[in-house]
Image (cartoon, rainbow, N blue to C red):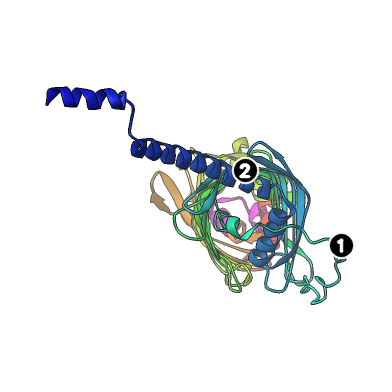
């Protein structure tokens, strides 16, 4: 029996059976088919990407998505990267923009995953978007007006279509220079971005993008031009969330903050902002530039519809740093009669106020202006069309400051608090030419004192000049001038 088994092994020669041989051949052939098929499909997909059919598919998809008439230049491929010199789109009645222009686009393809083209990065040299409520709808014959092509572009074969995705997953879009312009029905520009370096990436929530920007300029009508130092936002359909923004303007000034902006037919602003290093001379009239200097700092909010100027509300607090007041007639007068030259150029060690602005109506409260060792002003007022209303203040001076004015500390500055002698003060008139009631009251106090103490000649002069018992600013100044000889 052992001999028979040995004979059978000799007959087989140690070679595999015919069944195993055919099985191995089948596996080998299958491997070749898979290899050729995979690379054949890949080659077919690559050829399709470089064809006019793919370019036409891009145009069709873009026109449908953007509601626009799209013109796309030829695609150039280098390996898995495609280059497009530029493309333009003109929005129809349903588009959110009127015109779009893109120059120098480069996109890298990284295959297909989850039935989507994988595009990790898109780089664009320059992209411009123009938004206008004036732009007309495209004529219905716009497409028909295009010249018909003699030969239709080749389309992908049916067997290949199931391997070609109809959407893409984009990692990040980087634009070296982003330009946006928003115009109203009268074609007046209200908002614009120029040459802003931006980076955009889609977030998990559908339709939500994270957008960052820097450099470039921001234009807002009726505001000074601004440069973009930092911009971090999220955009979701008709809402923009500002995580952090910093804008520079007027050379050294900066405004930063966060908030959200509702877009659409009824826009809404909800912003929390901080202001720093704003030179007051950039805001003041030529006359006041000679009188007030310093830098503004503060925190404030903006709430409301920017289209409704009379209801848009700003409120917050401001501080003036390194402030100086000089050249005011009342300061010259006080310096003259107190014999303290520091009043001519008053350094402000504290200057702050809270404000609420709604349209042209401005309410100032918690106003504090202090020059250490000299004076302090507290109060509130309302400003409408540059007219001061309800100007109620308290003015304090350090003891001894007004010792050269007879009766000032005994009859006018009669309340002692916090190291100052205080008196009420009413200010009215325009912001450029304010009026105050202090001069007349100081004059009245001086006259009352001199009537009892001064020589008859000075008393007669004072009585002669006092034509208005209540006292006016002009009368008060003349009376004080008549009393100068007694104050020296």
Q: Which residue is mark 1?
A: 150
Residue at the spot 76% in from the left edge and 53% down from the top edge: 87
285 horizontally vs 427: left or right: right
Q: Secondary structure at mark 2?
A: helix
Q: Is residue 281 above or below residue 149?
A: above
Residue pictured at 85% horizontal, 62% vertical: 149
Relative image position of residue 222 (x, y in whole percent)? 71, 59
Horizontal and vertical percent position of residue 119: 57, 45
Residue furthest toward the bottom? 140
Residue 226 rendering spot, x and y as whole percentages: 67, 47
Relative height, residue 290 to residue 309 (above, below):
above
Residue displayed at 39% across by 50% down: 416
- Answer whether residue 422 is visible to the viewer in this image: yes
341 left or right of 101?
left
Image quadrant in which the C terminus is located: top right
* Dot placed on the residue nearer the N-terminal end, 2 or 1: 2
With 291 as the anchor, is 151 left or right in this view? right
In this view, the residue in front, 344 or 447, is 344
Q: Nearer the viewer, residue 218 or 253?
A: 218
Screen quadrant of the N terminus: top left
Disc number for residue 43:
2
Disc 2 crowd rating (10 Å Cα; few below 14, some 14-19, many 20+) is few
User: What residue span does the magenta drawing correspond to?
Assistant: 441-463
- The crowding category of the residue bearing disc 1, from other C-alpha atoms within 10 Å (few below 14, some 14 to 19, many at least 20), is few
């Amino acid at each position: 029996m052992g001999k028979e088994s040995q004979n059978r092994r000799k007959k087989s020669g140690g070679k595999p059976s015919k069944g195993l041989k055919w099985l191995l051949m089948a596996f080998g052939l299958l491997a070749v088919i898979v290899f050729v098929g995979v690379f054949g499909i890949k080659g077919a997909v690559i050829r399709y990407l470089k064809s006019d059919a793919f370019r036409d598919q891009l145009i069709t998809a873009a026109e449908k998505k953007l509601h626009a008439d799209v013109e796309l230049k030829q695609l150039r491929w280098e390996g898995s990267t495609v280059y497009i010199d530029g493309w333009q789109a003109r929005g129809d009645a349903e588009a959110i923009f009127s015109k779009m222009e893109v120059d120098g686009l480069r996109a890298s393809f990284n295959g297909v995953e989850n039935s989507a083209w994988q595009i990790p990065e898109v780089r664009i040299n320059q992209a411009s978007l123009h938004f206008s409520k004036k732009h007309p709808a495209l004529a219905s014959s716009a497409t028909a007006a295009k010249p018909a092509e003699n030969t239709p572009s080749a389309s992908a074969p049916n067997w290949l279509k199931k391997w070609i995705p109809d959407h893409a997953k984009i990692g990040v879009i980087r634009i070296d220079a982003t330009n946006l312009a928003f115009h109203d029905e009268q074609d007046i520009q209200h908002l614009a971005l120029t040459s802003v370096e931006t980076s955009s990436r889609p977030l998990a929530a559908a339709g939500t993008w994270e957008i960052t920007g820097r450099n470039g300029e921001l234009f807002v009508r009726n505001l000074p031009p601004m440069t973009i130092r930092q911009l971090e936002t999220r955009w979701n359909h008709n809402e923009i969330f500002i995580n952090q923004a910093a804008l520079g303007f007027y050379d050294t000034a900066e405004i930063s903050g966060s908030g959200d902006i509702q877009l659409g037919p009824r826009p809404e602003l909800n912003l929390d902002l901080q202001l720093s290093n704003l030179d007051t001379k950039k805001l003041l009239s030529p006359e006041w530039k000679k009188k007030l200097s310093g830098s503004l700092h503060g925190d404030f909010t903006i709430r409301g519809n920017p289209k409704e100027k009379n209801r848009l509300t700003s409120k917050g607090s401001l501080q003036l740093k390194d402030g100086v007041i000089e050249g005011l007639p009342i300061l010259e007068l006080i310096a003259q009669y107190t014999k303290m030259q520091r009043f001519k150029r008053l350094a402000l060690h504290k200057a702050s106020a809270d404000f609420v602005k709604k349209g042209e109506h401005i309410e100032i409260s918690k106003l504090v202006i202090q020059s250490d060792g000299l004076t302090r002003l507290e109060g509130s007022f309302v400003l409408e069309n540059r007219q001061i209303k309800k100007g109620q203040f308290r003015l304090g001076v350090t003891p001894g400051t007004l010792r050269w004015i007879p009766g000032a500390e005994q009859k006018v500055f009669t309340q002692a608090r916090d190291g100052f002698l205080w008196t009420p003060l009413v200010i009215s008139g325009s912001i450029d030419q304010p009026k105050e009631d202090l001069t007349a009251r100081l004059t009245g106090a001086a006259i009352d004192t001199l009537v009892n103490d001064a020589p008859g000649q000075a008393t007669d002069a004072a009585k002669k000049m006092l034509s208005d018992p209540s006292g006016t600013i002009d009368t008060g100044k003349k009376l004080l001038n008549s009393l100068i000889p007694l104050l020296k």
